[in-house]
Image (cartoon, rainbow, N blue to C red):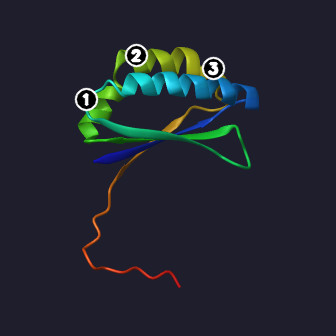
Amino acid sequence: MIRVIVEHVTKSKEDSERLMDLVLELRNEAMKQPGYITGETLINRSDPTNILVVSTWTSPEAWDAWDKCEARIVMTQQKMLPLLKKPYWVNKFDFARVPRGRVISIT
């Protein structure tokens, strides 16, 4: 599995609200894609123009296919990018494997 985090920084709070509608529309399309597992959207409490979209995919290849999908490209370039203060960025993360029984202490 792979977790993908996309960060958006919009020009205004109003643009953030519009972006949220577009994110939901895009997620509806993503849900139809092979390999999509789940997604969530996070809004920065201290800066509502900062939005993270987190999705989980079965494999990097499943994400890459969605990333290159025409529906996603059209939505991001034509509708989302004009709302952004700067280009969005994408980070892909693999799940860490922690051995059974291992306890991590944060003290």
Q: Which residue is mark 3?
A: 82
Residue 29: quadrant of the picture: top left
Circle 3: residue type:
Pro
Q: Pointer 2: residues within 10 angstroms few (<14), some, or many (20+)?
A: few
3 and 2 marks in contact (CB < 8 Å): no
**Residue in the picture at 43% in, 24% down:** 28
Which badge, 2 or 1, is on the more N-terminal residue? 1
Q: Where 35 sits versus 94, above or below?
A: above
Asked which secondary structure carries label 1, the reply is: loop
Residue 31: quadrant of the picture: top left
Q: Residue furthest bottom?
A: 107
Q: CA distance from mark 2 to mark 1?
A: 14 Å
Q: Is residue 34 left or right of residue 70?
A: left
User: Residue 107: x, y in percent?
Assistant: 53, 85
**Residue in the picture at 55% in, 34% down:** 88
**Residue in the picture at 34% in, 24% down:** 68
Which badge, 1 or 3, is on the more N-terminal residue? 1
> Closer to the camera, 73 or 102?
102
Which badge, 3 or 2, is on the more N-terminal residue? 2
Q: Pointer 1: residues within 10 angstroms few (<14), some, or many (20+)?
A: some
Residue 13: quadrant of the picture: top right
Q: Which residue is mark 1?
A: 34
Q: Is residue 47 left or right of residue 78?
A: right
Q: Which residue is mark 2?
A: 71
Q: Where 106 sits versus 14, above or below?
A: below
2 and 1 marks in contact (CB < 8 Å): no
Say which of marks 3 and 2 sits in front: 2
Q: CA distance from mark 3 to mark 2?
A: 17 Å
Circle 1: residue type:
Pro
Circle 2: residue type:
Ala
Image disc number at residue 62: none
Say which of marks 2 and 1 sits in front: 1
